[in-house]
Amino acid sequence: MVPELGVSSLISVCVSLFVILGGLAVFTLIVKKFRNGRFAMVAAKWGGGGAAAPNLINIIATRHLGAQASLLVVEADGKRFLLATGKHGVSTVGVLDRSGP
């Protein structure tokens, strides 16, 4: 015999589900901030304490080419590189000349 669920039990289950899904959404946003290298900027904005370490590698521009491919202009050690990313990894297309416009 299955006991009947009352209205208060149903509300409790719905609130618990809402809290769990909200926590997952917040966790996903935090992980995205870490992956995109923006966490130091967010921490400084929130008064994260201490000076953030300087970025030694900066992503200057990104162009998505499809579902699993993109081109990136990356600056490292004062030089700019054109990188290609895809389902098989990352490869260097070339070094960019900074003397252009």
Image (spheres, grey):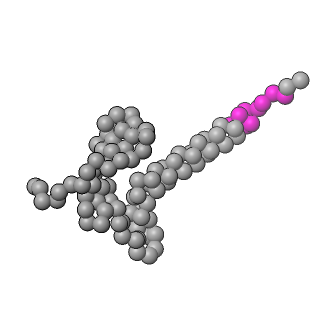
The C terminus lies in which quarter of the figure? Answer: bottom left
The outermost residue toward the top is: 1
Q: Is residue 7 above or below residue 62?
A: above
Residue at image coords 26%, 66%: 78
Quarter of image, res 12: top right
Q: Nearer the viewer, residue 70 or 14?
A: 70
Q: Is residue 85 magenta?
A: no
x 27%, y 55%: residue = 81
- Quadrant of the image occupied by residue 79: bottom left
**Residue 57 rendering spot, x and y as whole percentages:** 34, 62
Identify the image quadrant of the N terminus.
top right
Q: Residue furthest bottom?
A: 50
Locate residue 83, reporting x and y percent.
Answer: 31, 49
Q: Position of residue 10 (x, y in %)?
A: 71, 34
Which one is nearer the viewer's eye here, 22 or 86?
86
Whether residue 45 can be seen here: no
Q: Is residue 62 above or below residue 40?
A: above
Instruction: Name the residue located 84 percent from the left edge and 28 percent from the top edge.
Output: 3
Which quarter of the figure has residue 4? top right
The x and y percentages for residue 37 are: 41, 58
Does residue 12 appear in the picture of this structure?
A: yes
> Left or right of 90: which side holds 19?
right
Frontmost residue, 29 versus 64: 64
Q: How many marks?
A: 0
Q: Which residues are magenta?
A: 3-11
